């Protein structure tokens, strides 16, 4: 998702929740994304569902295809951009459970996303996972 502020584009990034990411910032932010479920065959349908689950925002057409990247862990991420329209007063995220601290036997619930923010493209390049940086370049080229 992107918007224009003072005629310059800003991109919407999400910070992953949970104890591993809690104190990480540079190179930790991501585009809201997730994995397809077994019944989904169209990557854009998966992307729209995941964006809604991680933010509470329903993506709106038109969608700008930004291609795909392969992340360090091997996951292929497809991306489409859309311009922000009406924004909610508050974003919401689904949650997940993990044992924390590890091997403690205590299950804790964490939000998938703990923070959301718009960044200028220059600032976003320092925040986003390095493997997803090409999406910023592609969006910038499209918006020229």
Image (cartoon, grey):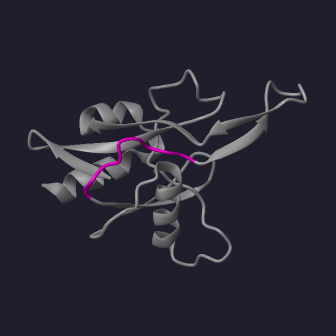
The residue at 9%/38% (across/down) is 6
| Picture coordinates of residue 20, whole percent (x, y) | 65, 29
Please identify the residue farthest to the left as the structure is shown. Answer: 7
- Left or right, 8 with respect to 114, comes to left
Q: Is residue 79 magenta?
A: no
Q: Is residue 31 left or right of residue 34?
A: left
Q: Is residue 37 above or below residue 129?
A: below
Q: Quarter-wise, where is residue 101 in the image?
A: top right
Residue 85 is a magenta residue: yes
Q: Position of residue 37 (x, y in %)?
A: 65, 68
Closer to us: 91 or 6:
91
Number of marks drawn? 0
Q: Start and end of the magenta stretch?
A: 83-93
Residue 47 spot, x, y in % from top left: 48, 63
Q: Is residue 131 above or below residue 117?
A: below
Q: Nearer the viewer, residue 101 or 30?
A: 101
Above/below status of 46 relative to 123: below
- Residue situated in front as seen by the camera: 89 or 120: 89
Please give the name of the residue rendered at 24% of the width and 36% of the height, measured from the top-left corner. 120
In the image, what residue occupies the spot 29% across and 36% down?
Answer: 119
Residue at the spot 12% in from the left edge and 55% down from the top edge = 144
For residue 141, which quarter of the picture?
bottom left
Q: Please identify the dominant SS of the magenta region.
A: loop
In this picture, is 60 found above or below 89?
below
Farthest top residue in view: 23
Residue 18, x across and y down, in percent: 64, 32
């Amino acid at each position: 998702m992107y918007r224009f502020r003072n005629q310059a584009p800003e991109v919407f990034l999400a910070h992953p929740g949970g104890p591993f990411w809690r104190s990480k910032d540079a190179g930790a932010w991501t585009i809201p994304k997730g994995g397809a479920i077994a019944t989904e065959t169209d990557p854009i349908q998966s992307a729209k569902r995941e964006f809604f689950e991680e933010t509470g925002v329903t993506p709106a057409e038109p969608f700008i295809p930004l291609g795909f990247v392969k992340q360090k862990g091997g996951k292929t991420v497809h991306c489409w951009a859309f311009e922000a329209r009406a924004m909610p007063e508050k974003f919401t995220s689904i949650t997940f459970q993990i044992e924390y601290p590890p091997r403690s036997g205590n299950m804790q619930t964490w939000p998938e996303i703990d923070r959301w923010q718009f960044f200028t493209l220059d600032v976003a390049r320092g925040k986003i996972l390095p493997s997803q940086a090409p999406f910023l370049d592609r969006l910038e080229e499209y918006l020229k």
